[in-house]
Amino acid sequence: MSRDRRRARQLVTLAGAVLAGTGVVAVGCGIASQEPAPPSPGGQAIDSGLASDSDEPAASPASPRSSDEPGADKPDADKPGADKSGDLAQAHPGEQPEPLTLDYSQPVRVEIPSIGVSSTLEELELNSAGAMEVPADPDQAGWFTPAPPPGVPGVSVISGHVTWNQEPVVFFRLGDLRAGDKIRVRRADGVTAVFTVERIGEFAKSTFPTKAVYTPTDGAEIRLITCGGEYDEANNRYLSNVIVWATMTSYHRA
């Protein structure tokens, strides 16, 4: 095992301990009401009563996007520059394929073609209250640095604001994602890690599914998080989070 991969696994363990212990739930939200409201995960499971210590997310697999629907992705192998050697290896009957992972490298940009997102990434830490910082720039997403970077074993976390001063910003359309949509993360080493959306849900902040979101995994996975649901005018905050689960399914050099 390479030194980079050992380091990645150490980060998985550390991040898992930090995240599971703190219940990191604070993410970017709008500071004023939004008209129209941001989209909810339409036609997909929404469970506002999932306890934060639940072992499994209640969100069911996301509804797939039809091939002729705007924003639908083509298979990665059909895209220019795709590296088919980065696809998941085929397992023999009765065998499980090895999880697809990469060596350690920091992320520099996230792209989600189906909802028009292309953003460089701020670095987010834990604040003094033990919650995840929010991006300083409402038009920019942020990578949570105590968690593993995208592509290495474990769960990486990217969050972003949904509205700002009554205007849609970077993750406004996160609730429009569907199963099979692609999330592309460009890394400092020149590799683009490609993640495929598996599920999406909307959860009350009071019952954020901490374990379901942050528990470490053997493969490379990513969670996208923003605010959503009902807006509390009195306190200038959304009452729920929209969360996307995705797994790395391929990679290529830009």
Image (cartoon, rainbow, N blue to C red):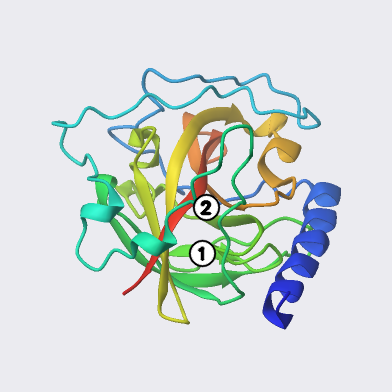
Residue 94 % position (x, y):
63, 32
Label 2 packing within 10 angstroms: few (<14), some (14-19), many (20+): many
Mark 1 secondary-structure assignment = strand
View extreme (front): residue: 92
Distance of label 1 from label 2 (alpha carbons)? 9 Å
Count of marks overlaid on the render: 2
Residue 157 % position (x, y):
59, 55
Label 1 packing within 10 angstroms: few (<14), some (14-19), many (20+): many
At horizontal 33% and vertical 65% (from top left) the residue drawn is 83
Task: Please say if the residues under marks 1 and 2 sit with CB atoms less than 8 Å apart.
Answer: yes
Residue 51 % position (x, y):
75, 25
Q: Is residue 126 left or right of residue 40?
A: right
Q: Is residue 65 left or right of residue 61?
A: left
* Quarter of the rendering containing residue 67: top left
Please give the label number shown on residue 28: 2
Please give the label number shown on residue 142: 1
Q: Quadrant of the N terminus?
A: bottom right
Q: Is residue 84 left or right of residue 27?
A: left
Amino acid type of disc 2?
Gly
